[in-house]
Amino acid sequence: VSNKIDLETLTGKWFIHKTNFPMWLKGDKENPSLNYSLIKKENETILFDEVLYTKNNKIKSIKGYDIPQNKNNTSFKWKGKGILALLSSKWKFVYLNLENEWAIIFFENTLFTPKGYDVISKKKTMESSILTDIDSKLKELDIFDLLQNIKQV
């Protein structure tokens, strides 16, 4: 992604639809979503990031901050909040389709997690034409075979 992304367009709920992230593929967590809101921290506008998911019929969350790492707001450093403050990771947009509100993000490996990709969308379910577009883009980027579908229920 080379164009500048307005942080405001990222706010709201993004559903994870495809991934190779082990936490989502183990099978004990459902309905993962990324929930972004704008906050001011140290005179800088950043994203407050709340990852929500269901485990054993209970909603769980992981909270942190996404700090832009470039002027285009395409690359971020995630820093955990509270007890997770010691943890951080880097991630970036590989592709963003603002019209149909979906994106492919890449996250670097950390001490605890491997590198990988997520396909996220503001829609919980997407029309088949958009799913076809996503698969085409994943094949073009040569990452189609890496990802598995996540069922949003």
Image: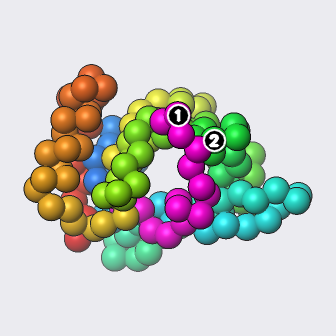
Q: Residues within 10 Å of mark 1 (few under 14, many from 20)?
A: few
Number of labelled discs?
2
Percent of width and height locating residue 42: 88, 58
Q: Which image quarter holds the C terminus?
A: bottom left
Q: Quadrant of residue 7?
A: bottom right
User: Does the CB distance between marks 1 and 2 fall below 8 Å?
Assistant: yes
As for residue 90 lying within the magenta part, the answer is no
Which residue type carries mark 2? Asn
Q: Which residue is mark 1?
A: 2
Who's the residue at 26% across and 35% down the image? 137
Q: Nearer the viewer, residue 39 or 5?
A: 5
Q: Which residue is mark 2?
A: 72
Say which label, 1 or 2, has the lower sequence index: 1
Q: Quadrant of residue 19?
A: top left
Which residue type carries mark 1? Ser
Report, in whole angstroms, how far the alpha carbon at label 1 lies from the one at label 2: 7 Å
Q: Describe residue 93's horizontal placement relative to residue 111 as left or right.
A: left
Who's the residue at 60% across and 31% down the image? 111
Q: Describe residue 65's horizontal placement relative to residue 42 as left or right.
A: left
Percent of width and height locating residue 145: 20, 29
Who's the residue at 59% across and 64% down the image? 8
Q: Nearer the viewer, residue 150 or 36?
A: 36
Percent of width and height locating residue 101: 36, 58
Residue 141 visible at all: yes
As for residue 13 lying within the magenta part, the answer is yes
Callout 1: SS? loop
Callout 2: SS? loop
Which span of residues is magenta-colored?
1-15
Q: Quadrant of residue 90?
A: top right
Q: Residue furthest right?
A: 42
